[in-house]
Amino acid sequence: MFGLFRKKPPANPYVKQDDPQTFRVRVKTNVHGDLVEIRFTKSAHIGVGDDGNHLFRKPIVSAEHFDKGELAVHFDRGYNVTGVEADGVEFIPVSDWS
């Protein structure tokens, strides 16, 4: 009834949801291996893509060596992560965060 027994998709190994509104990802730059953590929220940072689903896209510049990259996190309409993309950076799995 009304999605009560609907299965929730498995959590993405690269995106951590801190609370119902906030997400975090950690990436490592390809050039020097600098670590960068990005925190983003549904209301302020996630937009609607061309297909009607939600999208977070962010250019990255590391503080130590000014390495550049870009990441994108794709969500369905229920804010479940459906995919991640990276250019110039590599996602770090949540299980490897210390």
Image (spheres, helix red, strand yellow):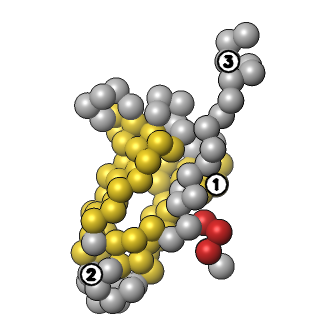
Q: Nearer the viewer, mark 1 or mark 3?
A: 3
Badge 3: residue crowd in 10 Å (few <14, some 14–19, many ≥20): few
SS state under label 3? loop
Query: Who is closer to the viewer here, 67 or 6?
Result: 6
Q: Residue at the far top: name it.
A: 1
Q: Is 9 located above or below residue 45 in the figure?
A: above
* Residue that carries the numbered disc 1 in the rendered image: 18
User: Mark 1 or mark 3: which comes first in sequence?
Assistant: 3
Residue topped by disc 2: 67
- What residue type is disc 3 on? Gly
For image coordinates 25% across by 75% down, the residue present is 68
Residue at x-position 35% and y-position 79% = 29
Real-space CA distance between mark 1 and mark 3, rounded to the nearest whole angstrom: 23 Å
87 or 60: which is nearer to us? 87
Q: Identify which residue is drawn at 39% across, 71% down.
A: 90
Q: Which mark is residue 10?
A: none
Between 96 and 17, which is closer to the camera in this rendering?
96
Instruction: Give me the disc on residue 3.
Output: 3
Pick whichever of labels 1 and 2 is earlier in the sequence: 1
